[in-house]
Amino acid sequence: MFCENCGNTINPGEAFCENCGAPVPGAQPPVQQAPEAQPVQQPMQQPLSDQPTQQPYQQPVQQYVEQPMGGYAPMAPKPPKKPMSPTMKKILLFGSIGVAAIVAFLIVLFVVIVPGCKKAQEDANRKEVASYITFKANDIDSGQTVVYSGNFTGELAWDYTKFAEDAGVTEAQAKSFLDTFDSGLTYTVSVNGGEKETIGFNHDFEEVKEEDEYVVEVKWPEKPTGYELEYAVKYYGQDFVDAMDDPDKLVEKAAKTMGIDLNVKFKKGTTSKTIKVADELSKNGITFAKAQDIDLLGYIKDNNLIKCETGWSTASVTVDQMEATFGDYKIYSTYPSTYLYVSDKDGKDIGNISLDFSPSSDNLYDGDTVTLSYDSYYVNSLKKYGINLIGDPVEYKVDAPETTTSSSSDRSDRLTLTQAKDNVDKLKAYFTDHIFDEDSDAKTGDKLTLQSIYFCDDNNDQYVVWVYKNDTQNYFNTMYAYATTLEISGNKIVDNGSVYSWDDDKGKTADEAISENYCMKYDPVKLA
């Protein structure tokens, strides 16, 4: 038999469908037997005692509902069960999946993500070693505004102030730590996008410009090997060496040796920093200004300031006394000289300029040609004040008819090395004629013995050097003369200039005397 409501199979004698609870037509409900009434049991009487009287426990009387005559009322039918809709099944299915996903997410969150985020945050807070590197210009004081243009020199430097703030130490402690710590690091640098070059931390960069840009890479130290390992272990200990591949341990040990605590952790591996020279220097108050071009050589030429003087039988040249203003600067001299002074708009002397005559400024003859140019050292030193010395070298032809009309380069009377070699006897005779005029310590009656004669050539000037011994006073000395002032005249070598001798050239031996004579550094050739 089947239920008319849900189609479920109904067993014989069942009054209601087991599945949906619908009544079965024609079925008699089973008669329920009423339970027999149980007599009320009286509690046992407890004997009297001194204990407080306890109330006896009474069994509650069960109440019975009188049923109508003819039997018992049928049980209320169960409400029919409706089939579960597909939508509800999907809701329950996906709901279960969602709960499982949430549980899984929470597990990942607290087991993986939270610790991972914490580590990521710690890694993000680690400092890059390269971030503490800055650029320092040489010969320019920090904390001052200096007008500088052109090329200059500089080097990498530690930013002690920045590190001290991050590490929670004083600048003195930061300097102590970083100056020791940098010895184990490796540095490479690329200048303006060029090739990488491994450098030392105190490497000097030449011809730096304000627009230059450096990319500096700092590599974490590796454990030393061989002799380096023995050295490191000896001075720092094995535990220190073992910690070199661990930034935290290495920094901790390095700092501990100095008695400081650092509130900073470094990233491991290679870190880099792009350094713009102008930006780094501006942090120290160093500013840049366009250099003022000054054509001092052109000014000297246009104003005919090269002065020729004649002395003895030769001539010399110099720059006449001058004072000229170029924008905010004044260049002047207090007497004829190739050494000039430079002052700023406030009248403060800020530098000097040295000019050179080539091949020489003296021992010249009529028709000789000399060239006036800048000394490069002073050109570079003035750039930091915004002065850029420009202009072409100036040629000057000696006008001294009282000397000789022939060009000195073609004169046959100039004492060359060949002539000196061919006239050694005349040079010995010249020494005998002049030595008492130059050696202030030599006295009448002293016996002087010539030891040797040298010819020296420094390309611009030539010298003849005599080495002699004062046998009476037992010392050695030297005497020298410009070869260009010595001429062969007849059977003698005559002097058209001056012979120079320095009393402090003396020595206990001939070698000591020679070493004191500055002419002897110019390729000496021994004549006798």
Image (tube, rainbow, N blue to C red):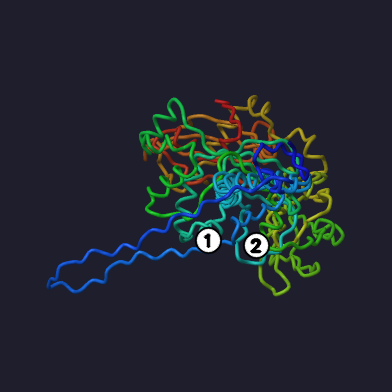
Label 1: which secondary element: helix
User: Within the image, what quadrant is residue 56 found in?
Assistant: bottom left
Residue drawn at (49%, 63%), measured in percent from left and top?
64
Mark 2 surroundings: few (<14), some (14-19) or many (≥20) residues within 10 A: few
Instruction: Decide which of 472, 135 is in the foreground and name it.
Output: 135
Q: Position of residue 31 (x, y in %)?
A: 57, 49
Q: Position of residue 338 (x, y in %)?
A: 71, 56
Q: In this view of the protein, can residue 95 be seen by the observer? A: yes
Residue 342 falls left or right of residue 240? right
Query: Mark 2 — residue?
Result: 283
Label 2: which secondary element: loop
User: Within the image, what quadrant is residue 297 found in?
Assistant: bottom right
Nearer-N-terminus badge (1/2): 1
In the drawing, what numbered circle is on residue 284?
Answer: none
Tell me the distance, in whole angstroms, between the alpha carbons under discs 1 and 2: 16 Å
Mark 1 surroundings: few (<14), some (14-19) or many (≥20) residues within 10 A: some
Residue 228 falls left or right of residue 161? left
Q: Position of residue 136 (x, y in %)?
A: 62, 54
Instruction: Say if mark 1 contacts mark 2, CB within 8 Å.
Output: no
Query: Mark 1 — residue?
Result: 165
Task: Give the number of callouts.
Answer: 2
417 vs 312: above or below: above
Looking at the rendering, in which quadrant would you find the C terminus?
Answer: top right
Q: In this view of the protein, can residue 313 be seen by the observer? A: no
Q: Amino acid at mark 2?
A: Lys
Instruction: Decide which of 376, 145 is in the foreground and name it.
Output: 145
Instruction: Decide which of 10, 207 is in the foreground and name it.
Output: 10
Q: Position of residue 23 (x, y in %)?
A: 71, 48
Residue drawn at (83%, 50%), measured in percent from left and top?
394
111 vs 277: above or below: above
